[in-house]
Image: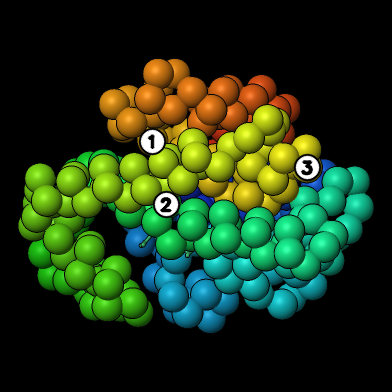
Amino acid sequence: MLELYHGGHTTCSRKARLCLKEKGLAYTSHFLNLRGFEQHTPAYLKLNPNGVVPTLVDDGEAITDSMLINEYLDEKYDQHIRLRPNNPLDKARMRVWTKLASDHGLSGVVPRVWPGFKAYTDKFNPSDLQQKIDRIPLTERKERWAKVARGGFGQQDLDAGHKAASLILTRMEASLGAGPWLMGAQYTLADIDLVPFVDRFAEFYPDLLNTTATPKVSAWLARMRERPALKAVWATDEAAAKAA
Ligand SMILES: N[C@@H](CCC(=O)N[C@@H](CS)C(=O)NCC(=O)O)C(=O)O
């Protein structure tokens, strides 16, 4: 039995949810309210010691990190659609893309999204908030939540986000050939892992992602947005399943 712990529309959650949907795999959905710090409860930290989403649980075994979850899913459930090339060289090339998404995708999104979380940290009284922050396992995340709470995001962060998005989009534009996908004719995890980020970049960085500056990425994104699996995943954050 497959279970996914996720944060709905967060980019990393969409990565795993899209892979599951493309492969036609049913799963039990566990929605975590990240702004309520549900990702740092002792029970969840047993599954994911980093205190982030997503986490896949397959027959009781937890697998963390969206890039690794997607590789695992495609390797174990080699049915319906195969999302990795067969030969080692192409597989390595695909992984260069999934690593690019993993290494730089969030950097392009965080400075645009996280400052808005201050509205949620402000709802806690200072000592409750400090307790929530104290139990965050990763130093980098602990510091990031503290920065949110003190309203510390600024122009420097926005500039860094712009640079990260530019790095990804420039590489994609230079490499997309006749397509239709990043690996050519085969739709792969490269497309799945990058689209949650690129989709947000279209909104955040219209100067970088448009039909003049990046025509190939724009056409790729339009093709991605036509996929039924993407439409289905983007249409819901699955939070209602929790409320029901
Ligand atoms: N490399 C990890 C990153 C996971 C990650 O940062 N997830 C974010 C959502 S996209 C999260 O859990 N944020 C909540 C937090 O940092 O407290 C992955 O791809 O799974």
Residue, x 77% and y 51% (percent of image)? 83
Quarter of the figure with residue 5: bottom right
Which is more N-terminal, label 1 or label 2?
A: 2
Residue farthest toward the right in the current orientation of the protein: 79
Of the 4 image quadrants, the one containing the C terminus is: top right
Residue 48 located left or right of residue 59: left
Q: Is mark 1 within 8 Å of ligand 1?
A: no
Alpha carbon distance from label 2 to label 1: 9 Å
| Label 3–label 1 contact, CB within 8 A | no
Along the line of sight, the residue nearer the viewer: 170 or 188: 170
Q: Quadrant of ligand 1?
A: bottom left
Q: Which mark is residue 44?
A: none
Q: Is mark 3 within 8 Å of ligand 1?
A: no
Q: What residue is disc 3 on?
A: 186
Q: Residues within 10 Å of mark 3 (few under 14, many from 20)?
A: some
> Which structural element holds mark 1?
helix
- Amino acid type, mark 3: Gln
- Amino acid type, mark 1: Phe
| Label 3–label 2 contact, CB within 8 A | no
Residue, x 64% and y 42% (percent of image)? 182
> Which structural element holds mark 3?
loop
- Amino acid type, mark 2: Gly
Of badges 3 and 1, the one in the foreground is 3
Q: What residue is disc 1 on?
A: 201
Task: Look at the image and tell me whether residue 219 can be seen.
Answer: yes
Q: Residue 21 location in percent, x, y?
A: 73, 43
Which is more N-terminal, label 1 or label 3?
A: 3
Vertical relation: 65 (above or below) 209: below
Q: Which mark is residue 105?
A: 2
Residue, x 33% and y 77% (percent of image)? 138
Which is more N-terminal, label 2 or label 3?
A: 2
